[in-house]
Image (cartoon, rainbow, N blue to C red):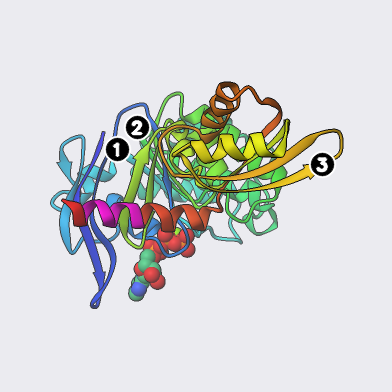
Amino acid sequence: MIEVLSVSRYYGSFPAVQDVTFQVQSGEILGFLGPNGAGKTTTMRMITGFLRPTRGDVRIHDVSVVEHPLEAKQYLGYLPEDNPLYPEYTPREYLTFRAGLYQVDHVQDALDRVVERTGIARVLDRPIGELSKGYRQRVGLAAALLHDPEILILDEPTTGLDPLQIVEIRELIRELGKEKTILLSTHILPEVQQLAHRVIIIHQGRIVAEGTPEELARRTAGGRVRALFRAERAAVEQALRSGDWVVGFELREEAGGRVAAVVVPRLQDEDPRERLFRTAVEHGLTLLELGMEGASLEEVFVHLTEERESREEAA
Ligand SMILES: Nc1ncnc2c1ncn2[C@@H]1O[C@H](COP(=O)(O)OP(=O)(O)OP(=O)(O)O)[C@@H](O)[C@H]1O
Ligand SMILES: [Mg+2]
């Protein structure tokens, strides 16, 4: 288990990470979501002991990363954002070199194990510089797995990959997640929705939201609901005016006695589609179509930050 305890990191006077606290439970895949510059990499480098927090501490199985970085690192496999590899080495040479660095016992066994886990047998003796980006990510993952750590810290593992490679690497991460505790950063919302059990959202160095992907999807559904009714325009208008969950709406009459509606819901925990459905039923309106346009991720981050700030002011 990872405990991140009130960690802050300043670059000069610039606060890249401010008072961040969260835990990663054993066996969990935790998604660490945030836009560019949010502080994901900085936080992960502090967790892995590569960067000293300005304040706070990180404990891995109760071992302080600040006080005992070498001991704490035993538990961790780390795939850094830029996945630094030596292009002139082959994966076999590189992994052998890394195994020496980690003082891995039984190097050949460890090599066999990670080669098999990451599916790189085919490219083991080709220079890394000639491999596809997807295979290079696999080699990076293989290196992170050499000392058989319980926990994997993966910093944007799918960035820069083509769509097919993304699917393959996600599948590999999902497989690894069956055995390992994983902290995975990304700025892609669907990625965490597909992979993570729980998500933490960071924006401008602070945690702005935390929850399961489903909870977050609901809270961040600040977008718009689109609906198509078979009803009188006036009846739809009256129904939408009656709901306190409606911030605004636009209606357009279509052929065949149908009315298309775009509804802006108040942001709340409930899925606004359910509210609209019930509103339609209560008013005896026939609903032909119902859909949701999600807010952009940037809108979501800004919204969650504002929500958090207003909560703090209220407190
Ligand atoms: N070595 C450094 N010196 C000064 N500022 C830095 C340094 N490293 C990071 N920063 C700043 O700290 C903030 C957080 O950066 P960080 O790399 O942690 O973000 P990130 O969430 O990983 O972003 P990305 O999605 O682009 O990788 C950014 O504003 C960045 O410019
Ligand atoms: Mg980063």
Residue ranking furthest to the bottom = 12
Q: Residue at x 71, y 32 (%)?
A: 229
Residue beneath label 1, please?
A: 75
Residue 164 lies in quadrant: top right
| 17 lies above or below 222 | below
User: Which segment is the magenta one?
Assistant: 306-312
Residue 153 position, x and y percent, is: 39, 44
Residues at circles 1 and 2 in contact by the CB criterion of under 8 Å = yes
* Distance CA(mark 1)–CA(mark 2): 6 Å
Q: Looking at the image, can residue 273 be seen?
A: yes
Q: What is the C-alpha distance between the residues marked 1 and 3?
A: 62 Å
Instruction: Point out the tag, 1 or 3, that comes first from the N-terminus.
Output: 1
Q: Quadrant of ligand 1?
A: bottom left
277 up-or-down from 161: above or below = above
Query: Residue at the right extreme?
Result: 255
The residue identified by callout 2 is 150
Amino acid type at image mark 1: Tyr
Q: Residues within 10 Å of mark 2 (few under 14, many from 20)?
A: some
Q: Secondary structure at mark 2?
A: loop
Q: Which residue lies at the image location 24% right of the left edge and 69% below the top edge?
A: 10
Q: Residue at x 42, y 54 (%)?
A: 303
Q: Where does the image place residue 38, in percent across and percent down from the top left?
A: 39, 61
Pointer 3 residue: 254
Left or right, 76 with reference to 247: left
Q: Position of residue 167 (x, y in %)?
A: 65, 38
The answer to whether the residues at label 3 and label 2 have Cβ atoms under 8 Å apart is: no
SS category of the residue bearing label 1: loop
The residue sitting at the left extreme is 67
First in residue order: circle 1 vs circle 2: 1
